[in-house]
Image: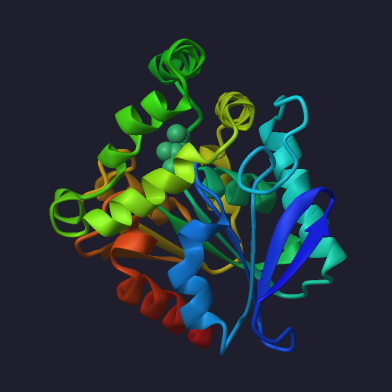
Amino acid sequence: MQQRTINSLSVKLYGDKKNPPIIFVHGFPFDHRMWINQLENLQNEFYCVAYDVRGLGDSYIGDGQYTMEAFVHDLFSIINELHLKNVTVCGLSMGGYIALRAVEMNQDKIKALILLDTKSEADDNLGKLKRAGAVDIINLHGLNQFVDQTVPSLFAEETLKDNQELVDRILGQCYDQDSHGVKGSVLAMVSRTDTTSFLASIKIPTLVMAGSFDTLTPPAMMRKMSEKIPNSEFAIVPRGGHMAPLENPDFVNDMIRGFLKKI
Ligand code: MLT
């Protein structure tokens, strides 16, 4: 693994740059480590790039004021700086919001899209109020309380019961985040646009995957999104919640490998 800093973002590079590139965009409030199973498993066949979104992990925190547009420009800055040609963008949840807007902005730069546990809709009024509540909890009670109240529910029941080590590891990674960066990411998500009307204009091959027990972006919702994308395929990740790539990595890795081999 190699480490680079690009545009104040912490970027990890796995594998040989001669191989087809995949750039992984993580969800909230995580960092590149949520892709560890994909990076380690796929690095022999693909050039795997994973970075920490601004404000999270080891990337620049600054004043904690970010927008979705800035997140998307950050993604393109890495693609450009690393000269990634024919790159596949793989995003989970917030990473999917970033990926979808990036494709809307310039799909000529992207060869294929992989969307996991995400949606195209922007926050509705209830969603905005929940974001305001999240910022309040962090301000009043601290980041750990916010993490304890939100992150466990992202896992499937079975994961919570049978894989406490994984849940504890991911909770630990979330506690390590900077609270300014986390609040900044919350507000950046509020600033995102709705990409639903663009889905029909996506020309690149797209793989959409939903954890079978994901309650935040359930399979039925993701199937509908997939049906709006002309050249897309849809899969349900068995035993997965919202954190499907961590909960059932073998299935997700096989799907990514199979999809990218045939396009
Ligand atoms: C994520 O996993 O990135 C978040 O759940 C997305 C969100 O809060 O909208």
Give how far across and how far down residue 240 sits, in percent.
25, 58
Q: Residue at x 45, y 75 (%)?
A: 256
Q: Quadrant of residue 10?
A: bottom right
- Of residues 50 and 161, the one nearer the viewer is 161
Q: Residue 179, image x and y in percent?
A: 57, 27
Residue 188 shows in the view: yes
In the image, is 111 to the left or to the right of 214?
right
Q: Position of residue 45 (x, y in %)?
A: 57, 89
Name which residue lies at 77% across and 31% down: 62
Q: Which residue corresponds to the image point at 48% horizontal and 56% vertical from the top-left?
A: 229
- For the rendered model, the colour scheme is rainbow
Judge from the rendering whether residue 12 lies leftward or rightward of residue 120; answer left or right: right
The answer to whether residue 211 shows anywhere in this view is no
Q: Residue at x 27, y 58 (%)?
A: 165
Is 222 situated above or below 254? Answer: above
Figure quadrant of residue 248: bottom left
Q: Quadrant of the N terminus?
A: bottom right
Image quadrant assignment for residue 187: top right
Left or right: 39, with 109 as reference point: left
State the count of labels. Answer: 0
- Judged from the image, the quadrant occupied by ligand 1 is top left
User: Percent position (x, y) of residue 7?
Assistant: 84, 50
189 shown above or below 154 = above
Q: Quadrant of the C terminus?
A: bottom right
136 and 202: which is toward the camera: 136
